[in-house]
Each structure stands twice: as structure tokens, then as C-alpha cells.
Amino acid sequence: MRKEVVLLPGDGVGKEIMRGAKAVLETIASEYHHEFVLHEHAIGGDAIDQHGIPLPDDTVKACENADAILLGAVGGPKWDALPAEKRPEKGLLGIRKALGLFANLRPVQGFSPLVHASPLKTELVDGCDILIVRELTGGLYFGEPSGRSEDGQSVVDTLSYTRKEIERIVDKGFQAARLRGGHLTSVDKANVLESSRMWREVVNEKAELYPDVTVEHQLVDSAAMKLITNPKHFDVIVTENLFGDILSDEASVLTGSLGMLPSASVRTDGVGLYEPVHGSAPDIAGKGIVNPLGMILSAAMMLRHSFGMEKEAEQIERAVSQSLSDGYHTRDLNVQSGKVVDTEGMISKVIEHLSTESISNSICSS
Ligand code: NAD
Ligand code: IPM
Ligand code: MN
């Protein structure tokens, strides 16, 4: 298969982790005789430095024409003093909105060699497997009005949703639950927010269309607590934009590191954008120690969801798992035994496992 992939490395550790995604795609391409044509474009602070704006038109055009997009991370202290419209984060929000990527799928799946890497008790995290379905193009992030009054003494951000926007993300949640453990937790703040009360209404209406899925409502504050006291209770969580942002970083603790989580931002059909859940990690950028696995697993999600390459995606996930089983890990993972490697070392281990599997496959099939 020939696929056009846009790469948006972005800022901070973005470029370091993108190397991992590229290496993995090159290996998969040569083994399966695919052709991945990679086009690199600027976004975020990188685009501000090169073109004066966080989301240049040619980046948007390239993304619209691509088969899929891989993004590293945006943002950093260098650009923190800029006004809202010119911040790197606007580039990311802008591309999500421009492409209509309303559903952000964030799987939180522990790898067994890492059960002791979580600060939580092993019996709580062992075997946990959650999918957070986060609404991505509405809510507080995009509501108008938003800004400061002229005298600078008051501020406003608006949380708004149309019923349609809620319906389509809730459908995604139900559809995902149907394909997994059949349990959906809708997280809201319906005791306070009108938007959450409409959200709850929609979930209850949709529940009738998915009788095979069990549904519960959970307020976001207690959901945050339950996520770390009883994570195995959850199967699929569907929630609005900001709640999903916060809960997914919290949930990453179950896996041992924020650096482990991949994500897919998708719409009903067409192009998808794949990126790790973490940010540009300015505190470690440039040191060569960032964990590349969230990015590599995002590339696997791209192969599965955008290109239907299930076998290839599984092979990458297995290579990650085997590298961890061998004891290799980056220093963000608090594993007592094993060997600490830098970013390049971790990428090399994954590539070694991908290649070893290719060799043994070809021996078996010959
Ligand atoms: P962050 O996710 O960048 O980092 C939080 C902490 O986790 C840091 O200590 C960092 O070193 C560590 N960490 C994150 N990813 C890691 C990895 N792969 N390997 C090892 N350690 C890792 O969050 P932050 O510090 O709150 O934000 C920094 C910048 O990133 C901000 O400008 C923010 O806007 C931006 N950001 C961007 C994205 C994105 O592009 N998708 C996501 C979140 C934050
Ligand atoms: C994420 C990030 C972004 C978000 C920021 C950088 C705009 O935190 O992708 O989780 O809040 O969506
Ligand atoms: Mn976030």
C-alpha cells in the first residue's frame, strides 16, 4: 500500500520522539512492501519561528490532503508570553478544528513488565485496560466569548456544546464500548453545569440504541478519585474536552509514565491525526532521554485505524512489549531492575524486535 503521511514534529521533545515513529514506519514499510511517503511540516512554536504563525496555511493544506498525520508535541516557555491567538497551542487546536477531528481516543493499557513502575499498588493496575473517548473540538476550548475585558479586570471562557456535537461523541463512546468490554462510563458535572445536564440526557437517549452496552454516569470529581482507587472498574469513559484532557494525564499514572500513552484524533471518516498524550516536556527537551513509546504506539494506532493494517500495528505493539520485557526502559519509568536507555537506545530496541520478528516470519513462511 502507498500512503501519504504528514509529520508535524513541533516543539521540545517532539522532534526526538518523531525519529522513533519514522524508524518504525521505515521498518514496517520494508517488511510489508508498503510505501509511506513522509512530508514534514511546521506547527506550533516551530511554525511561529519559521513563519510567524502557529498554523501556516500550507500545513493545513498538506494535512487535508494526507492519508494520515503524526504529531509530536507543541509549546514551550519560549512562546509562553505570546497572546492567545499566537501561542503554539493554537496551532494544535486549529488543526484539530480545521479537520473536524472531534473524537480523541486515548487507550490506557498497562504493559505487564511495567506493573511495578506505577506508584499505585500492583494489584490495582495489573491488567487495567481503559479507553478514554474525549470530545476534542468543542467545550471550553472553543466557546465564544473568550478573553479579557478592555480594562483587564475580568475574563471569560465559555463552555458551549450543540446537541449534535454531544450526540456524535457519545455515539463514538457507545460504539467503542460495544467492541470492547461493553461498559460505558459517562463523566460529567451534571450537578453544576447545564452543558453536563444536556450531555447526560443525550447519553440516556443513546443508551436505548445500544442495549448491549451497560451505562453509568459519574461526576468528574469522584471519577478522578475512582480512576486511581479502582481503575479496573472502567472500560470506556466518554467525556467532554477539558475533563478528558485532565483525566487522561491522571490515567497515565496507571501505566507508569505519561510518556507511554498514544492517542488518535478522528472524525466519522477520512483523515486521522495521531499523537502521544504528553506535551513538549521542556524540562527534558534536547537531552535525548524522552520516552519515545507513546509516539511509537501512536504510529501503530495510525496503521490500525487509518490504514487498516492490523497485523503491522500488532507487530509494533509486540516489539514495544518485548523491549520492555527485556528490561529496557527510559528513565521516566520507575523500574527497579532492568536497564535504563536513552531515547535512541529505546528506539533501537523496538526496531531490533521488529526486525527479528520479520526474519523469523520469513523463515517460517519459506
Ligand atoms: P508535559 O506533558 O510536556 O510534561 C509533563 C511532565 O512529564 C514533565 O516532567 C515531562 O518531562 C514528563 N514527560 C512528558 N512526556 C514524557 C516522555 N515522553 N518521556 C519522559 N517524560 C515525559 O506537560 P507540561 O510540562 O504541563 O507542558 C509542557 C508544554 O507542552 C506546554 O507548553 C504545554 O502547552 C504543551 N503540551 C502540548 C501537548 C501536545 O502537543 N499535544 C500536550 C500537553 C502539553
Ligand atoms: C493535549 C494537550 C492539548 C489539549 C493542549 C496543548 C492544547 O494538553 O493534547 O492533551 O489540552 O488538548
Ligand atoms: Mn493534555
Image (cartoon, grey):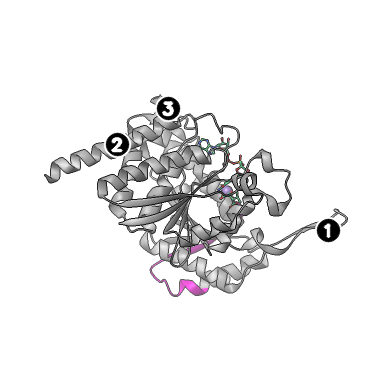
Q: Position of residue 285 (x, y in %)?
A: 56, 34
Magenta segment: 205-222
Q: Is residue 285 above or below residue 233?
A: above
Counting other residues with Cα less than 10 Å from the Cα at mark 3, is it few (<14), some (14-19), or many (20 or more)? many
Amino acid at circle 1: Ser
Q: Assign the C terminus to one quadrant of the image.
A: top left
Give me the disc on residue 341. Answer: 3
Q: Where is residue 216 in the image (x, y as percent from the top left)?
A: 50, 63
Q: Distance between the residues labelled 2 and 3?
A: 16 Å
In which of the image's four quarters is ligand 1 placed?
top right
Image-based side of 118 in relation to 285, left or right:
left
Q: Does the numbered disc 2 mark a residue whose Cβ is under 8 Å from ligand 1?
A: no
Residue occupying the point 52% across, 62% down: 101
Q: Which numbered disc, 2 or 3, marks the residue that appears first in the sequence?
A: 3
Q: Distance between the residues labelled 1 and 2?
A: 56 Å
Image-based side of 146 in relation to 138, left or right:
right
Which residue lies under the disc numbered 1? 149
Q: In this view, does 13 lie above or below 174?
A: above
Amino acid at circle 3: Val
Q: Which of 72 and 184 is in front in this view?
A: 72
Marks 2 and 3 close (CB-CB < 8 Å): no
Q: Which numbered disc, 3 or 1, marks the residue that appears first in the sequence?
A: 1
Q: How far apart are marks 3 and 1 (CA)?
A: 50 Å
Q: Which of 71 and 200 is in front in this view?
A: 71
Label 2: which secondary element: helix
Which residue lies under the disc numbered 2? 353
Marks 3 and 1 close (CB-CB < 8 Å): no
Image-based side of 88 in relation to 178, left or right:
right
